[in-house]
Amino acid sequence: MQVSPEFEDFFCAQSTGGASRKQNGARRDSGQRYRQQGFPGLVQRNIVDIIRRLPPCHCLHTAVNPLLDRLQPYPFQRLRQLFAGAKPDAALRHVDLSIGEPKHPTPALITEAIAANFDGLAQYPATLGTPALREAIADWLAQRYGIARPDPALQVLPVNGSREALFSFVQAVIDPTGPTQPVVVSPNPFYQIYEGAALLAGAEPYYVNCLPETNLLADWASVPQEIWQRTQVVFVCSPGNPTGAVMGLDGWRTLFALAERHNFIIASDECYSEIWFDSPPLGALQAASLLGHDYERLVVFSSLSKRSNAPGMRSGFVAGDAEILAKFLLYRTYHGSAMSTMLQAASVAAWRDEAHVEANRAAYRAKFEAVVPLLAAPLKAQMPDAAFYLWAEVPARYDGDDTAFARELYERCHVTVLPGSYLARTAHGVNPGAGRVRLALVANLDDCVEGARRIAEFAR
C-alpha cells in the first residue's frame, strides 16, 4: 500500500490524538511507532476510529440532496427504538411475526436453475432482460389473469424485485417542472417505499385512508379535485399490505375513469397476488381487460419473493403501458438495474411452474386456519382476502395504543408484532393504523401457532 507523506502525517496525527508529529514530540514518538509497526495494517485497524474523530460533514459539506431530510424512519427502525431497554423472558423462544419476509423453503427448481447457469456471471446482462424471461412473464400473465398475452418485447420489463422498481419508477415518471408541486396518491396504511419514492422525486404524498367503513380499501371518491388535478401517480396495493384487502372491479372502474380524466399513471403493486384462500385476486391488467380498457397509463408490479419464496433473488417485473415502459427502460439503462442472466434463468423456471406456488399457498392457508380462531376474540382478527398478514386490533384496555401493546407483548411473551401506526400516517384527522398491529404469518406452522397462543393468553 503506497500513501503520500501528507496522508501518513495526517493519519499519525489523528491516531495519536489530533496533534501533528511536528507540533508534539511525545505524539511524534507515538506516530513513529505506528510507522514501525506497519502503516498499512494500522490503517485497516484504526480507520474507523479516525473517521469518528472527524468533524461532522468534514467532506460532504452541504452537497447532498435536501429531500433526504424528508424521509421518515423506517418502521423497523422505530420498532428497534421502541424495544430499546426491553428485557423479554429469555426462557421463552422468540417468535417474530413482525417482518413480512417469506420463510418457506425456496423451491429446488430455482436453486437448480441457478446452479446450472453460473456461466452467466461472466457476462454483463441487458437491462431489457432475456427474451426467454420476458416471454415466460407474458405467458404467466395471460394464463393467470385470462387476458390477451402482453407483448414480451414492449409490455414486459424484468426488474430486480418490486421494491427497487416501485421506487425507481416514480423517479422516472414524475415531472417536477410544472407550475405546481406534483402529487403521488397512496393508500394509508401503505408500503413505505411509496412515500419515500414520492418525497425523493420532489412530489407531495397524499394519503387515502383505508378504514373499516370502506372495507379497508381506499375511498377514491374522497380525494379532492384540487389533488387530482396535481396527481401524476396513484399507487394501488391489492392485495393490500398490511390489510390483505383486494380491490374489486367497481374500484378499478372508478380509478380508470379518474386516470382518464386527470391523466395520471396507475402503479399497481401486486406482489401478494398469489397468496390467497378462496379465489384468486383480481389484477389491474385483468380489470382493464374486463372493462374494455387498454393499458394506457397503467403499469403493474409483481415479484417472485412471495410467490416463490425467493426474496433474496430480487426478481420481479413491470408490465403494462408500452410507452411508459419504454421511458422506464431508458431510465433503467442509466440507473444500472440489469438482472444477472443466472437469476433470469432461475426466474424463467419459477414463472413457468405452478406446483410450488400451490404448495406455498396451501402452507399459508393451514397457518391462517390455525391462527385466526385463536386470535378472533382477543384481537378481533379476521381472515384477509389475500396476502400473509393479519391486521388485528389491540385489546380495549390499551385504549388504541398499539405501541404500548407491542412493547409489553415483547417483554412478557417474547413475541414481536409491528405496531400498525408505524405503517400509516395521520391524515384527515386519523391514523388508520393506530390501535392495530400487523402479524406476518411467515414462520413455520408451529411457530405461528405458538406465537398466537401467547398473544391470546396475554390479550385476555
Image (cartoon, rainbow, N blue to C red):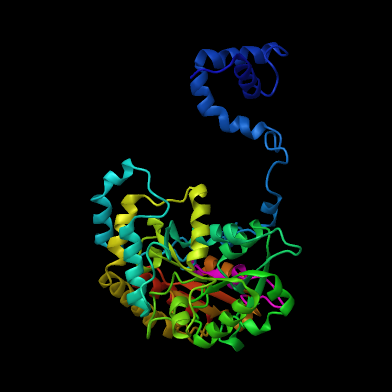
Q: Is residue 382 left or right of residue 134?
A: right
Which quadrant of the figure has residue 396?
bottom right
Q: Is residue 296 left or right of residue 121?
A: right
Query: Quick check: can you spot residue 195?
Result: yes
* Residue 429 visible here: no
State which quadrant residue 254 falls in.
bottom right
Q: Position of residue 72 (x, y in %)?
A: 65, 59
Query: Is 208 positioned to the left or the right of 350 in the image?
Result: right
Q: Nearer the viewer, residue 203 or 100?
A: 203
Residue at 61% over, 20% down: 7
> What residue is at 55 percent from the left and 18 percent from the top?
3
User: In this rendering, would 56 be left or right of 407?
Assistant: right
Work out whether residue 295 or residue 93 is closer to the camera in this orientation and state it.
295
Magenta stretch: residue 289 in it? no
Residue farthest to the right? 179
Q: Where in the figure is residue 21, as x and y percent of width and height?
A: 67, 14
Q: Position of residue 225 (x, y in %)?
A: 72, 79
Name the residue: 60% across, 76% down. 259
Give whichever of 151, 377 is nearer the camera: 151
Q: Is residue 427 inside the magenta stretch? A: yes
Give me the residue at 66% from left, 32% from top: 53
Please state the horizontal and vertical placement of residue 390, each as a whole percent of the image: 48, 77
**The residue stretch that appears in magenta:** 413-433
